[in-house]
Amino acid sequence: IEIVGKKRLVLDLSCRRKPEEPSGSYYVVTDRWQKYTDLPVNEKTLGELAAYCDEFLVHGVEVEGKRCGILEDLVTLLGEYSPVPVTYAGGVRSIEDMDNVLTLGGGKVDLTIGSALDCFGGTLKYDDVVAWHNKKNTKD
């Protein structure tokens, strides 16, 4: 942080639930998403980590690249508790998923779309995503 400064750092948090706790907390995972840390993704952790970065990029590992829908509870958690800008990645497959991120995240959660885009072999048209973005960001 001393060298580049907090304003130039985005902290990438890949997270998933432990198999033995399918309804439990999300934990940060490492080593190709296989090794669980003891770091839960919650209000306290997000608050502490925000002191070291300007933004979070949060991957929902369980749905990343699968085009099977977003992790709604994770998006809600991020919208409620992230004290810095946050971008969610994982599972987006449709405009409806994009609307859900906007709603569940309280307008505070951005998102990334990868394999679902038509330019990457998916069915979600890039032009439709741009149109959605422009519509949501146009002031009446």
Image (cartoon, helix red, strand yellow):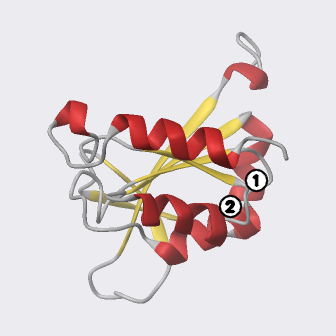
Is mark 2 in CB contact (under 8 Å) with mark 1?
yes
Q: Which residue is the extreme one toward the front?
A: 140
Residue 53 at what x, y percent from top left? 71, 34
Residue at left 61%, top 32%? 10
Q: Would you say 89 lies left or right of 138 here?
A: left
Which residue occupies the foreground of this view, 84 or 107?
A: 107
Residue 48: assigned label = 1
Q: Amino acid at mark 2?
A: Thr
Residue 79 at what x, y percent from top left? 70, 64
Residue 45: assigned label = 2
Label 1: which secondary element: helix
Q: Is residue 82 above or below residue 120?
A: below
Q: Would you say 62 lies left or right of 37 here?
A: left
Q: Amino acid at mark 1?
A: Glu
Q: Is residue 120 above or below residue 19?
A: above
Residue 101 at what x, y percent from top left? 56, 63
Distance of mark 2 from mark 1, alpha carbons?
A: 5 Å
